[in-house]
Image (cartoon, rainbow, N blue to C red):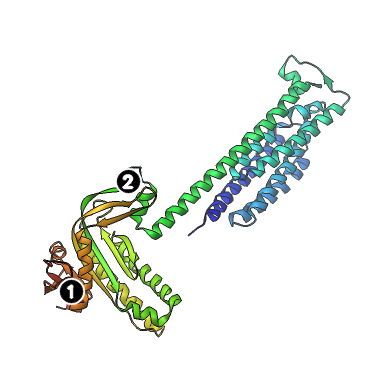
């Protein structure tokens, strides 16, 4: 399962890859624009600036898409973009043949585009760096303009005069610098917010994955998306099928193999069995030591809950067969388990307090299923079904074991040993 950090790195890598891709497209478009529309531009000089930058960016993109150098690649891409686009300002200026004041008045728009693109990286440090570099670069351009003897400080009447003429309006220039710094701050803050949003989403995704390790997918989804009504103590009556399983001789087995091996075996066993339960739409209500309590129909309306419970019992026997085959290959003795299945109305809902809730099934049907599982010791059967379950499954056959006495049950139901599918085909 991916951690929050891993999910964030993946999102960041995708953002940096998008950023670099847009840089390549923008640099290529800028190159074409200068070559096509700036009549005095020197093609070799323009290409000498743009092509190395495009090649370096392409190499960085190749690395980032393979999840390598993600953070470093982003920083290098920012610097390459500044170094590649910076000279374009001077190349365009030379092509226009105007005074140096042109630099201070037109040099920052390309930087603003680059600044906005850094928001895709989910790294607030990138727009912050670009903002500082652009402010320094813009200050350099202003200094060059002021150093030009032809620069005139004046109040201008028209936009054309402001852009193309030698006059430089310091108030307007200061306003542009302030706009640049404000834009940088906004983009940096927005990127920080976007990063935190992605981190929160990653944590929720991880939490949902962790919930599914404790609960069935249905319960995990309901808990993750639950409304306040669901997360309150209370419940309702619902018809459910209940399955209880228990490993035979587990106490002796655990004493013979030690605690570490016991926990490894139990984890392997429970993993195999829960996969079968979930595959048939069941929910694991709880693990009781080496036992499993599973329900069918507890989390919502479910077609044929009894048939699903019986199919799960059959699947668990097949899973146990595979487990024993692996144990035999490892030189370990086989294990057995007992399964009881019963169905009826039960109270389904949350028990506990507002601080600690447990979604569970309560009622005689659960207690009786536990007794049916224990009756397997008396009858020697691996799976016992109650008459209520067998009658709800017309395609399932079983051998009657009569009304086996069950502790604490005055009128025990008739029980049936489940006929394995292979035996039914042979009959």
- In the image, 86 versus 275, the foreground residue is 275
Q: Quadrant of residue 321?
A: bottom left
- Indicate the position of residue 174 as horizontal and vertical percent values: 75, 25
- Indicate the position of residue 148 as horizontal and vertical percent values: 87, 27
- In the image, 25 versus 350, the foreground residue is 350
Instruction: Give the side of residue 16 with respect to residue 283, left or right.
Output: right
**Residue in the picture at 38% in, 52% down:** 356
Check residue 419 in the rendering and tell me which mark sits there, or answer none. 1
Q: Mark 2 highlights which residue?
A: 230
**Distance (Cα) linking label 2 and label 1:** 40 Å
Q: Quadrant of residue 285?
A: bottom left
**Residue in the picture at 17% in, 75% down:** 424
Crowd class of label 2 (few under 14; some 14 to 19; many from 20; radius 10 Å): some
The furthest residue to the right: 149
Relative to 369, residue 117 above or below: above
Q: Tell me the element at label 1.
A: loop
Instruction: Give the side of residue 380 with respect to residue 125, left or right.
Output: left
Q: Is residue 110 visible?
A: yes
Instruction: Give the side of residue 11 with respect to residue 312, left or right.
Output: right
The furthest residue to the bottom: 331
Report the number of numbered marks: 2
Check residue 55 in the rendering and tell me which mark sits there, or answer none. none
- Indicate the position of residue 382 as horizontal and vertical percent values: 23, 75
Residue mark closest to the camera, 2 vs 1: 2
Q: Circles 2 and 1: CB distance less than 8 Å?
A: no
**Residue in the picture at 72% in, 32% down:** 108
Relative to 208, residue 275 above or below: below
**Residue in the picture at 43% in, 57% down:** 210
- Indicate the position of residue 28 as horizontal and vertical percent values: 66, 42
The furthest residue to the top: 157
């Amino acid at each position: 399962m991916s951690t929050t950090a891993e999910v964030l790195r993946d999102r960041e890598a995708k953002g940096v890859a998008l950023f670099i891709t847009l840089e390549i497209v923008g640099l290529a478009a800028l190159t074409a624009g200068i070559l096509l529309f700036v009549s005095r531009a020197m093609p070799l000089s323009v290409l000498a600036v743009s092509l190395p930058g495009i090649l370096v960016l392409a190499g960085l993109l190749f690395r980032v898409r393979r999840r390598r150098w993600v953070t470093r690649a982003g920083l290098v891409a920012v610097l390459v973009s500044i170094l590649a686009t910076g000279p374009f300002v001077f190349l365009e200026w030379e092509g226009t043949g105007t005074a140096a004041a042109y630099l201070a008045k037109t040099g920052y728009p390309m930087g603003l585009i680059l600044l906005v693109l850094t928001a895709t990286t989910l790294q607030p440090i990138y727009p912050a760096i670009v903002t500082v570099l652009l402010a320094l670069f813009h200050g350099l351009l202003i200094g060059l303009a002021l150093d030009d003897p032809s620069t005139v400080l004046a109040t201008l009447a028209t936009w054309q005069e402001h852009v193309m003429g030698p006059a430089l309006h310091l108030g307007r220039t200061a306003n542009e610098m302030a706009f640049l710094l404000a834009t940088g701050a906004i983009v940096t803050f927005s990127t920080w917010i976007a990063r935190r949003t992605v981190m929160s989403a990653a944590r929720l995704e991880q939490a949902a994955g962790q919930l599914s390790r404790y609960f069935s997918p249905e319960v995990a989804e309901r808990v993750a998306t639950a409304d306040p009504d669901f997360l309150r103590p209370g419940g309702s009556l619902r018809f459910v099928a209940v399955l209880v399983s228990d490993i035979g001789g587990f106490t002796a087995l655990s004493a013979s193999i030690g605690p570490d091996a016991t926990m490894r075996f139990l984890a392997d066993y429970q993993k195999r069995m829960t996969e079968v339960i979930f595959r048939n739409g069941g929910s694991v209500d709880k693990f009781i030591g080496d036992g499993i309590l599973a329900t069918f129909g507890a989390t919502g309306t479910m077609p044929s809950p009894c048939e699903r419970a019986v199919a799960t019992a059959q699947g668990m026997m097949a899973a146990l067969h595979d487990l024993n085959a692996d144990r035999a290959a490892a030189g370990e003795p086989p294990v057995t388990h007992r399964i009881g299945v019963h169905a009826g109305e039960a109270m389904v809902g949350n028990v506990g307090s507002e601080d600690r809730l447990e979604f569970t099934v309560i009622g005689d049907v659960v207690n009786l299923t536990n007794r049916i599982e224990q009756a397997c010791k008396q009858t020697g059967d691996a799976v016992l079904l109650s008459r209520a379950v067998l009658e709800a499954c017309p395609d399932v056959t079983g051998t009657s074991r009569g009304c086996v006495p069950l502790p604490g049950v005055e009128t025990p139901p008739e029980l049936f040993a489940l006929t394995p599918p292979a035996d039914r085909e042979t009959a």
